Amino acid sequence: MRVISAAQPRIAVLVSSGTGFPKGFYERFARYLAERGAAVLTYDFRGIAGSRPDELKGSTIDYPDWGRLDMPAALDALIEAAPGLRLVHVGHSVGGHFVGFMPNHDRIERHAFVSVGTGWWGGHHRRYNLLELFFWLGFGPFSLMRHGYIKGGGLWAGTDLPRGVFTTWRRWCLKREYFSKELETTLRPHHYEAVSAPIRSWIFTDDPIATPGTARDLLSVYPNARSEISVHAPGDFGARRIGHEGAFRKGMEPLWDQVFHWLNNGEA
């Protein structure tokens, strides 16, 4: 975990990563929020980057563990590091999927989702479908057979991933309902119906994964949270490309201003 903070912070921000993104990917974003008056905690989910065990082969880590164990622990650490401050959350991709697994989700006042949509391949941009199906059905199984985990590099540009993370992720992404049906059965207990903090979801027109449709589908698992989707083209922020990960890259300060204002006082 890493906390970057203003000298006298007014708000505490938890940043939850996308799948395979190390906490360092969000460093520039975290520093920008700190300059605006925030204390910001970034962290690595178990099994990846700084939280990767020496031996990943044979790991029993599963995808929901990130929401049940890591996200609440990170929030508790932020509360300890920045006591008495309002707590808000930025979730990138899967960082917005797992809020409902957090037993302490009620400590968070509001959520900013960035590029958050279900992983169902059929809801993604058509140009992306062949690549992701090859990842699920070809590259991934081969990597598991050869290494015992998903090895980063090549087609998969993210960090190494534990077997259980990949296999659960794949199972969900090959189904139209993603994980929503499993919330009624194997994923209990959870707290999705209890999440009531407002959510604002930023979606980008060139993101092949988090589309307006998959964003709506994902938000439907939070039925009691007031939510809204804000769709933008890259040019709205002076960018040529944003895609699924570009919202946190250099040059996206106009977007970060929007996110900070939403988190700080609810303005768009």
Image (spheres, grey):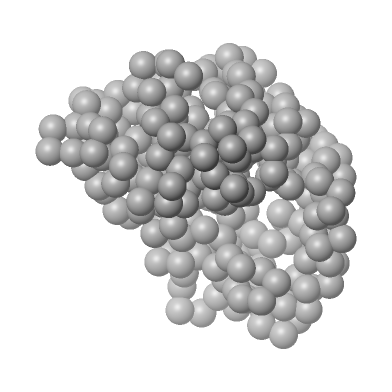
Number of marks in picture: 0
> Is residue 39 in view?
no
Q: Is residue 114 above or below residue 241?
A: above
Residue 83 in the image, given as x and y percentages of width and height: 20, 31
Q: Which residue lies furthest to the left in this view?
A: 7
Camera-side residue: 115 or 178? 115
Q: Nearer the viewer, residue 37 or 80?
A: 37
Q: Is residue 195 left or right of residue 256?
A: right
Report x, y in % for residue 120.
80, 45
Taking the image as drawn, is residue 26 in sight?
yes
Residue at 43 percent across and 16 percent down: it is: 267
Horizontal arrangement in the rendering, residue 38 relative to residue 249 (left or right): left
Residue that appears at 66% across and 83% down: 147
Q: Residue 239's image quarter?
A: top right
Residue appearing at x 78%, y 31% in the figure? 213
**Residue 29 position in % (x across, y down):** 38, 46
Compared with 250, 81 (above or below) is above
Q: State the image quarter where residue 233 is shown.
A: top right
> Would you say 222 lies left or right of 40 here?
right
> What residue is rendered at 63% in x and 23% in y?
229
| The N terminus: image quadrant | bottom left
Which residue appears farthest toward the bottom when viewing the image?
Answer: 146
